[in-house]
């Protein structure tokens, strides 16, 4: 699941590794998500990015269930270097699409990092029935593509809205997709 609305969304700046907290609306979205999940699932573990917006969302979910709470740096959003915290308008002027972004990571490096997080989840928590992952849009995109066996070059694009919920199940070695980017909890 993705975190709720953050201050960066309101300011219209690039987030990436910039560490913005949730807005009041983001807290409300996370609270609705937590109620939705705990009414339907017994969460055994929550694994989250350490960035505030994801951590706060995960902490709200944790308040509704008794489970392990794990912070994993590999679940952080894409390291977009000098774009982090820069307004979208200024970024387009200063760094047009054809200009490499200094201080960031490549999509391949990002994918590798997310694959390491997934390996940890499956190795250390794969025996559990329900593991909730609270992260970021880019992180979830790479998690989903990794689970589907897609390379960085052939990856599918998945949109994940604020508190968008993806439910996947690993059953007898097969992947079952129950939903992608569900936001019914916000209705």
Image (cartoon, grey):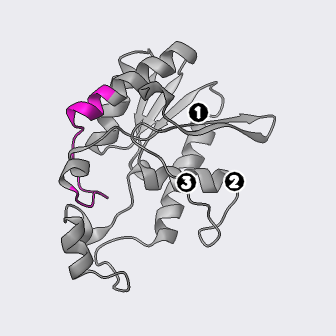
N-terminal-most mark, 3 or 2: 2
Which segment did they paint magenta? 12-28
- Residue 72 pos. (x, y %): 41, 44
**Residue, disc 1:** 125
Point 27% across, 29% down: residue: 27
Q: Residue furthest bottom?
A: 98
- Residue 167 pos. (x, y %): 60, 35
Q: Is residue 87 left or right of residue 119?
A: left
Which mark lies nearer to you, 3 or 1? 3
Which mark lies nearer to you, 2 or 1? 2
Can residue 59 be seen here? The reply is: no
N-terminal-most mark, 2 or 1: 1
Can residue 86 be seen here? The reply is: yes
- Identify the image quadrant of residue 18: bottom left
- Identify the image quadrant of residue 128: top right
Q: Secondary structure at mark 3?
A: loop
Which mark lies nearer to you, 3 or 2? 3
At label 1, counting other C-alpha atoms closer than 10 Å, the crowd grade (few under 14, some 14-19, many 20 or more) is some
Q: Is residue 5 left or right of residue 146?
A: left
- Identify the image quadrant of residue 54: top left
Q: Where is the C terminus found, in terms of image quarters? A: top left
Q: Is residue 94 magenta?
A: no
Secondary structure mainly formed by the magenta segment? loop
Point 35% across, 23% down: residue: 31
Mark 3 and mark 2 residues within 8 Å of each other at the beta carbon = no
Distance between the alpha carbons at the discs numbered 3 and 1? 25 Å
| In the depicted structure, whether residue 174 falls above or below residue 88 | above
């Amino acid at each position: 699941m993705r975190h709720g609305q953050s201050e960066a969304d309101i300011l219209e700046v690039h987030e990436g590794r910039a560490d913005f907290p949730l807005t009041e609306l983001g807290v409300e979205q996370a609270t609705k998500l937590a109620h939705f999940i705990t009414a339907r699932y017994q969460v055994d573990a929550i694994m989250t990015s350490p960035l505030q917006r994801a951590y706060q969302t995960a902490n709200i979910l944790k308040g509704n269930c008794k489970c392990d709470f794990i912070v994993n740096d590999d679940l952080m959003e894409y390291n977009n270097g000098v774009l982090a915290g820069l307004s979208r308008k200024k970024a387009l002027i200063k760094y047009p699409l054809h200009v490499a972004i200094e201080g960031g990571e490549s999509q391949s490096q990002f994918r590798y990092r997310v694959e390491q997080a997934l390996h940890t989840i499956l190795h250390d928590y794969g025996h559990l029935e329900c593991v909730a992952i609270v992260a970021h849009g880019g992180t979830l995109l790479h998690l989903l593509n990794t689970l589907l066996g897609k390379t960085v070059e052939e990856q599918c694009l998945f949109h994940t809205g604020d508190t968008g919920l993806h439910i996947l199940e690993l059953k007898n070695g097969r992947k079952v997709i129950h939903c992608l980017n569900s936001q019914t909890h916000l209705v």
